[in-house]
Structure formats: C-alpha cells, structure tokens
Amino acid sequence: MTPAPDLTFSGTATINGVTLFAPLTLTIGAGAWTCLLGGSGVGKTTVLRLIAGLETGAEFSGQIAASDGQSVPDRVAYMAQDDLLLPWATVVQNVSLGARLRGEVVDLDRRDRLIERMRLQDHMAKKPAELSGGQRQRVALARTLMEDRPIVLLDEPFSALDARTRADMQDLAAEALQGRTVLLVTHDPAEAARLGQSITVMTQLGLTPCDPPKAPAPRHVDDLETLETQGALLKLLREAA
Amino acid sequence: MKFLSALAATIFALAVWQAIVSMTGLPKFILPGPALVAETWWQSRWLIAEHTWITAIEVLIGLCCGTLLGVVTALQLANSRAARVLVQPMLIFTQALPVFALAPLLTLWLGYGLWSKVAMAVLIIYFPITSSFFDGLMRTPPGFLDLARTMQASPRAVLWHIRIPAALPALASGMRLAAVYAPIGAVIGEWVGSSQGLGYLMLLANGRAKTDLMFAAMLTLGVFSILLHMFVRRATARMAGEAR
Ligand SMILES: Nc1ncnc2c1ncn2[C@@H]1O[C@H](COP(=O)(O)OP(=O)(O)OP(=O)(O)O)[C@@H](O)[C@H]1O
Ligand SMILES: [Mg+2]
C-alpha cells in the first residue's frame, strides 16, 4: 500500500447539458476523514463515483488528482449504502472477493484476522441472507479493509442501519480506517459531526467548509460540541434548500 | 399438502372423465373410460415401457445437448458485441419458424433414428435456454460490476465470479421450461417419421382405432413429462438459490 495521499477534486459536471454542479474544488486531506454532506440529489454520489472512476450519468470536465501524482482509481476501495455482498458466496468468499477477482492468492491469515476483528468469526460459512443488516455491513467493511487501499470512498454506507448499529459501525469504521484518506458521502449531519476531520457541505450553491468539532473522531454521540456542529450543519443544509 | 392436492385433482379428473363416458355412452373407440385405459395400460405395460424408454433417451440427450448449446451461445452473445449483432437476429428468426415445419427436413437429413428426434428436442429448447441465460448474464446488478471495477477485475474474472453466478437463477428457470418443451419436441419428431417411441405408438394406436392404447401412451407421456419437470426442478434448486 502506498502512503495515503491528498486528493483534489476540481471541476464541473452537467447532465444532458444541465449543470449539476458549478465549478467547485474539494480537497480531501491525506490520512484523514473528509465528510461531504448534502441533501438528496445535489451530486454527492456523482462526485464519489467520478473519483472512483465509475460510470456516472454526468459529463465531467475538470481534474481529479492525488498529491503523489499516481493514479487514483487504481488505489480506491469502495463501499456503498447497499452492502453489495454476493448472495451466492459465503462470508469468507465475500471478504476475499478482490483477490479472487484479480486472480491473486488470498492471504488467509489476513482474511481471518479481519473477520475476527469485525466479530464475524461465528458466521464465516454463512451466506449474506443469513446475516442481519449490521452483520452484512461488517462483512462489507471487512471486504473493504481486505483491499488494503490508501484511499477509501464511502457512499452512505451506514444509512440503512438502525441508530444503535449505525453508531457501532461508525466507531468500528473510524478505528479500522485510521491513516487512510477517507471520503464519506452522507446526508446525515450527525454522522458528519461524529466522523469528519474535515467537513464540507454541498448544496446547489456550491461547497461550504465547516469547522469540525475539536474532539478526536469518532466523537461521543453526546459530546456537546459535536451536537452543536450537528445543529450548525443541519442549519446550513436547510438554508440552501 | 401439495401431494394431497395433486391426488385430489387426479381423482376429480378421473371422476369427470368417467361421468362423461357413462352419460354420453360413447363407444370405446371414440372415448374409452379410465378403467379400460388402465386395463389396457397394464396389459401393454411392456410395450409401453419399451417405447417410453426410447422417448426418454431422446428427451434426455436432447435436454443435455440443448442446454449445453444454449449455455455456450448465451456466453458468446454476452461476451461479444459482434456475436450479438450477427447472431441475435438469426436466433429470433429461427424462433419465428414453426418447429413442425422443420421436422420433415430433420428426418430427411438425420434419418429415421434417434438423432432426428434429439435434434427436434434441441431445437425446441435451444431458444428458451439461450435467451433466459443471456438475459441473466446481461442483467448483473450494476453495483456488483462497480465493485468489481474498483477491484481491478479482468472481464474474464467478472464473468466467472460475478456474471455467471448471478445469471444461474435465470438459467435454472430456462432449464425448467426446457424440461416441459423437450418431450414435445421429441414426440413431434416421432410423429413425422419413426418406428419407435411414445409418439410413434400413439400414432400407431390411433391408426388402428385402438383408442384405449392411444390414451394409455398419451397419459404415460404426461406422467413422464411431469416427473422430468419435477426432477429438473430439484436438480436446479441450488442454482435457483432456493433452499440450501
Ligand atoms: N445515471 C444518471 N443519469 C442521469 N441522471 C443521473 C444519473 N445519476 C444521477 N443522476 C442525477 O444526478 C443528480 C445527482 O445525483 P447523485 O446520485 O449524485 O445525488 P446524491 O447527492 O448522491 O443524492 P442522494 O443523497 O439521494 O444519494 C440527481 O438529480 C440525479 O437525478
Ligand atoms: Mg447518493
């Protein structure tokens, strides 16, 4: 794994000639969590998919670059709201999917360590349909970590979970992804306030940076400053609408 | 429960059949009653078994060949744009041709024996297998493909590890359809020209006004088709992602 780089995303996107977002610049700090917060349909997923080098319905003109000058899409791990577990494959097979797809030998020790770390050791041979929503997201997180990429792109990975499971997953992910360049796209101000080491609000008007709470992430759910930040973020979101 | 309802339906159908025979008083060479058909079936059981065996062989070979051919075609179509442009219209055109019309040709080309019937069965199941598997291969959930892309998977690996497994339920439903169609294909082949098989036996019995034997052969074919369908259902349950 190369050291986690800074990322710069700058440019504009149109869909069938209609502007989705005007020229904007988003800087994603090396080895830190950047939260991109925005309402539905402003183009958060589009930004994230452009960085991952995936198809979007939008036409993008601009630049996406890493500070070390190396390719970005070759070094990302991607985790979406839908856990994207293969329903016919077991937990262990899903976790090691990347290596199998690349025809590499699976590092079994690493795989088993990650499965244990995600507290999935009792479910190794199960299929996704036999797991709860939280367990499934933990498998997806294990698969993401198995890829061992310096850049991790998260598209609302926890939004389908219940409040408690979501908070647990946030803690787990924050700890597990330390030291990587993480972009978390979310529409939840509470999530951004808990996890962001840098927080940017995306609206139709453009990007507004917002100061993160001083406490180290993941912050306590009842941390006062975190709650204040959450309120301020929600206000920003509502002003734009 | 399922078995009980099947049993009830069978008894009901037999009762209706018997009632029609009793009430209309039709002569037995027009409509034999269930009792007579059962008796004939028992008396001719070895004859019927022999011909059932022939038809079964044709159907099973046809099913295997047709499935194999359909799977290979679907993979080619899914893999190559050129194949889609060239072959897909042809495939649809051949579907528009009535299979009945092709049967005499197949007999002419392949002779009176086994292979013209196998070819008929293959022809009739080739399209359902190909199109269901092909559809499955083209309908991979896009999220899986995105994920594979971020993992730098080669197209081959994506096909093998994601697209094919994701398409297996579709292939399973194609195969279940094929199990119903294949006996029809083989029997059509036998009607057009043969000296063996249930289709032949039905034609022969009909020609000699042995309507009871004709019924016995026909019902045997029906039971065989149902058993075959049940077998294929079972065999494809894992593929379809049902009950582990
Ligand atoms: N493939 C596509 N073709 C055409 N338009 C698209 C396509 N994908 C997204 N859009 C449009 O682009 C806009 C931004 O979509 P995007 O998915 O980036 O929003 P988002 O901020 O992630 O929203 P959400 O929070 O609901 O996920 C939406 O208005 C959507 O309708
Ligand atoms: Mg989105």
Image (cartoon, coloured by chain):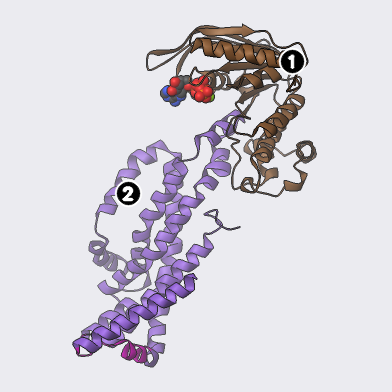
| Vertical position of residue A78 compared to residue B49: above or below | above
Q: Which SS class for mark 2?
A: helix
**Tag 2 residue:** B91
Q: Chain of mark 2?
A: B
Magenta residues (range): B25-41
For this rendering, which residue is in front, A183 or A39? Answer: A39
Q: Badge 1: how crowded within 10 Å, few (<14), some, or many (20+)? A: few
| Vertical position of residue B113 compared to residue A190: above or below | below
**Tag 1 residue:** A224
Q: Which SS class for mark 1?
A: helix
Cα distance, mark 1 to mark 2? 68 Å
| Vertical position of residue A60 compared to residue A173: above or below | above
- Amino acid carrying label 2: it is Leu
Give the image quarter of residue B53. bottom left
Left or right placement of residue A187 versus residue B41 in this view: right
Give the image quarter of residue A105. top right
* Residue B197 in view here: no
For this rendering, which residue is in front, B153 or A239? Answer: A239
- Amino acid carrying label 1: it is Leu
Left or right placement of residue B117 versus residue A93 in this view: left
Chain assigned brown: A
| Vertical position of residue B186 compared to residue B218: above or below | above
Q: Position of residue A94 (x, y in %)?
A: 66, 41
Residue B128 is a magenta residue: no
Residue B37 is a magenta residue: yes
Q: Position of residue A226 (x, y in %)?
A: 71, 16
Q: Colour of chain B?
A: purple
